[in-house]
Image (cartoon, rainbow, N blue to C red):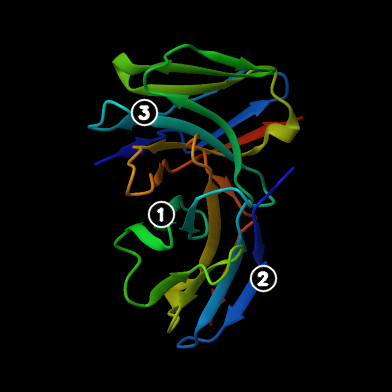
Amino acid sequence: EPEVTQTPSHQVTQMGQEVILRCVPISNHLYFYWYRQILGQKVEFLVSFYNNEISEKSEIFDDQFSVERPDGSNFTLKIRSTKLEDSAMYFCASRGWTFYEQYFGPGTRLTVT
Amino acid sequence: AQKVTQAQTEISVVEKEDVTLDCVYETRDTTYYLFWYKQPPSGELVFLIRRNSFDEQNEISGRYSWNFQKSTSSFNFTITASQVVDSAVYFCALSEPQETSGSRLTFGEGTQLTVNP
């Protein structure tokens, strides 16, 4: 069964460093998303991406964040200069055209020290 | 603006008990989708069910059932004869489908269900 994959599973970085989180969505899906979950809290929407551009972003997704689909399979989230409060689990999700359920990857735990 | 409320932060039951997880939502759209996701201790988010706003038929899948009531803006989830493996955080979520905006999911705070042997 196709699934969303994410790498790395855990990333530790120092404050101020750039990180790139990688995702491979399900191959025939058209919509791609990033969400984050601070430990013990709810899942929060960051950004959606469709037709090679951002379709919607939340107030969390400021100028420090960017997304890219550099080729036909990968979908990346870049944080330019990480802050302590960026420590969270980051989930990638994708969905197809017809149905609205999103399928999530296993997440990348980002720890900023 | 869309909002999802899961008033039960934690629920603890003994195995084989039935348990209902509550979800109340707010939306201004007439067309929307509701979802339940399960987050086991391993951390991944597992899709359980999607309901459309125009289909109020309740659904049963094995030990799981869902009660959708538009009149009370609720989409409750019942686990019958609970098992230890049902222990997880359960999230209710709402999506207002838009052609161009991507249909973000708005999640509730989640309910931590613990099933004790």
Instruction: Give the numbered dot on residue A8.
Output: 2
Of marks 3 and 2, the one in the foreground:
2
The subunit letter for the residue under badge 3 reads B
Residue type at mark 1: give it: Phe
Q: Amino acid at mark 3?
A: Val
User: Residue lying farthest top?
Assistant: B57
Residue A23 drawn at (x, y percent): 60, 63
Where the C terminus of chain B falls, by quadrant? top right
Residue found at x 34% / y 43%: B99
Q: CA distance from mark 1 to mark 2?
A: 20 Å
Report the Cα–Cα distance between label 1 and label 3: 19 Å
| Residue A16 sits above or below residue A57 on the image | below
Q: Nearer the viewer, mark 1 or mark 3?
A: 1
Have a look at marks 1 and 2 and say if they share a chain: yes
Task: Please name whichever residue, B22 or A61, is drawn nearer the observer in this view of the structure.
Answer: A61
Mark carried by residue B24: 3
Relative height, residue B90 to residue B61 (above, below): below
Q: In the image, residue B32 lies at what x, y percent?
A: 35, 30
**For marks 1 and 2 on the same chain, the one whose residue lies earlier in the sequence:** 2
Judging from the image, mark 1 belongs to the subunit labelled: A
* Three-letter code, disc 2: Pro
Residue A109 in which image quadrant: bottom right
Q: Above or below — where is A88 with respect to B98?
A: below
Kind of element beneath mark 1: strand
**Residue A112 seen by the camera:** no
Between residues A1 and B78, which one lies in front from this camera angle? A1
Residue A50 lies left or right of residue A89; in this view the side is: left
